[in-house]
Amino acid sequence: MSKFGSRFAVLLAGALASGLVLAGPSAAAPLFPGGPEIPGLPEIPLPELPGVPGLPGAPAEPSVGPANFSAPAISPASGEVVGVAQPIALRFDEPIGDRGMAERAIEITTTPEVDGAFYWINDSQVRWKPTEFWPAHTQVTVNAGGSHSAFSIGDAVVSVADDATKQITVTVNGEVVKTMPTSLGKPGYETPNGTYIVGEKRRDMYMDSSTYGVPVDSPEGYRTYVEYATRISYSGIFVHAAPWSVSQQGYSNVSHGCLNVSTEDGKWFFENVGRGDPVIVQNTAGGVLSGSDGLGDWNR
């Protein structure tokens, strides 16, 4: 056999061993000068490599557009630990004309991945919250126009105040840890239903009816010293100690809208429920807390 013939035999044997069938048109160019005609091998596509940007099958790079605002204030701030109902708030130094452009310039990254959406409070404040409560212990980073925040979500501490039973039930990560009798808003001052968000907490304070338009010296007026006050609405609804209504707690509603509890229970709530934790009020005759209340974001 000639030198070229032996080389062809070796090539053919290798092709058969690999499972390739070599066949083609007679017009194919000869593989070797003067030798038999062998068509070109079929082109084998390269597999896609997922997870590497720029290669086929890789996820798209996240796109963050140019900012049409100066560095905003971001809340929660870096290092904070907040509850599962806490929204992200960005406050700008100037009114925003193109809201869509501003949203595209805000990068929110979560671990694990969490779906959510923006909503605007006014032209200089936008908020973002998850579609459902944050998963406990989520890590969140926000970058916007040179501002940065990295905060985390704590345990899922959820309180439910039910006017049907006049009890507040507190769960932590799905397990009941506390049940306390309460007295909600009396007729004419019914506590609104809905999901509230815990805001500030005050060890003690004076509650004054004139702050919402009822003179202190009127029949329904008051200026009362209270302890262990946990705010759950901008409109003045608190969970607080009310030793004067202990005999009604669990049985009837006598407050002006707040959730009255005993001093012992008020202290426990103050110490164990924190900013961003949800308080869900249900089965009252008070309508629904406004979504524009400031701590009523979940009712939008």
Image: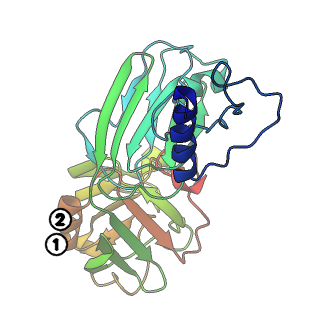
Give the labeled residue for mark 2: 267
Side (left or right) of 226 relative to 276: left
The residue carrying pointer 2 sits among few (fewer than 14), some (14 to 19) or many (20 or more) residues within 10 Å by Cα, namely some
Q: Is residue 88 visible?
A: yes
Residue contact at pointers 2 and 1, CB within 8 angstroms = yes
- Disc 1 marks which amino acid? Glu
- Percent across and percent down for residue 162 are 45, 78
Foreground of the two, 19 or 146:
19
Give the image quarter of residue 155: bottom left
Distance between mark 2 and mark 1 Cα atoms: 5 Å
Q: Which quadrant: the N terminus?
A: top right
- Percent across and percent down for residue 258 are 40, 63
Name the secondary structure under disc 2.
helix
- Percent across and percent down for residue 59 are 53, 37
Q: Is residue 258 above or below residue 128?
A: below
Q: Is residue 225 visible?
A: no
Foreground of the two, 25 or 285:
25
Side (left or right) of 107 relative to 39: left
Q: Is residue 268 above or below residue 236?
A: below
Residue drawn 25% across the image and 40% down it: 80
Tell me the tag on residue 175: none
Give the labeled residue for mark 1: 264
Give the image quarter of residue 141: top left
Residue drawn 36% across the image and 69% down it: 159
Foreground of the two, 3 or 136:
3
- Percent across and percent down for residue 226 are 24, 58
- Disc 2 marks which amino acid? Lys
